[in-house]
Amino acid sequence: MTEAWAGRVPLVSARVDTDADRAVTELYSAHYRSLVRLAALLVRDLGTAEEVVQDAFVAMHGGWHRLRDNEKALAYLRQAVVNRSRSVLRHRQVVDRNAPKPAPDMPSAEHGAIALFERSAVIAALRTLPARQREALVLRFYADMPEAQIAETMRISRGAVKSHTARAMQALRTMLEREE
């Protein structure tokens, strides 16, 4: 490259940047508010509308050299605002569709007190059961073991596990109904 050629490139680039700066600044001064109103009507949120319009102006400034007809700059900006607003709305739909489900409502204090009372009544009733019946129930419902594993743990047959569990359940039911 010759020095003359190398010297011209920055001048042309600087002049294009200056033209873009001036043109975009004029458009911004004249049309920013109306474009924000347009975006706000589309996205229903002023903060997001301002971001959409700012992004459209930044994109216009960066692509000013590609604009063939400077008279169509406002139309280009409006279309950019509409397109970016559509993107925001599509993004919101995706976020809403994939939002985590809210946690279930917490139980009331009364519910907690009743549950504690019922639990303590069950524990008290469990303590009155014969050892084998209590062991079978605890392994079945607290440890969540299957019958075969309970039989192995207690060193009894599966039939004996079924028998101890059934008798223990009947005894608990009778004791708890009497307390009510």
Image (cartoon, rainbow, N blue to C red):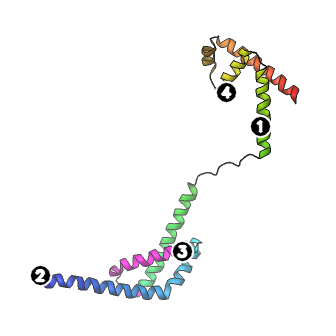
Where, by quadrant of the figure, is residue 77 drawn? bottom left
Where residue 16 sits in the image (x, y, percent)? 30, 85
Q: Quadrant of the C terminus?
A: top right
Q: Secondary structure at mark 1?
A: helix
- Sequence-earlier tag: 4 or 3: 3
For the point 56% across and 71% down, the residue is 43
Q: Quadrant of the N terminus?
A: bottom left
Q: Which residue is mark 1?
A: 115
Determine whether 91 is above or below 123 in the image: below
Q: Secondary structure at mark 4?
A: helix
Q: Secondary structure at mark 3?
A: helix
Q: Decide which of 146, 172 is in the foreground and name it.
A: 172
Q: Decide which of 106, 60 is in the foreground and name it.
A: 106
- Sequence-earlier tag: 4 or 1: 1
Q: Main secondary structure of the magenta part?
A: helix
Q: The disc labelled 4 sits on which kind of residue?
A: Tyr
As measured in the structure, the alpha-carbon distance from the residue carrying label 4 to the one carrying label 2 is 88 Å
Determine whether 42 is above or below 134 in the image: below
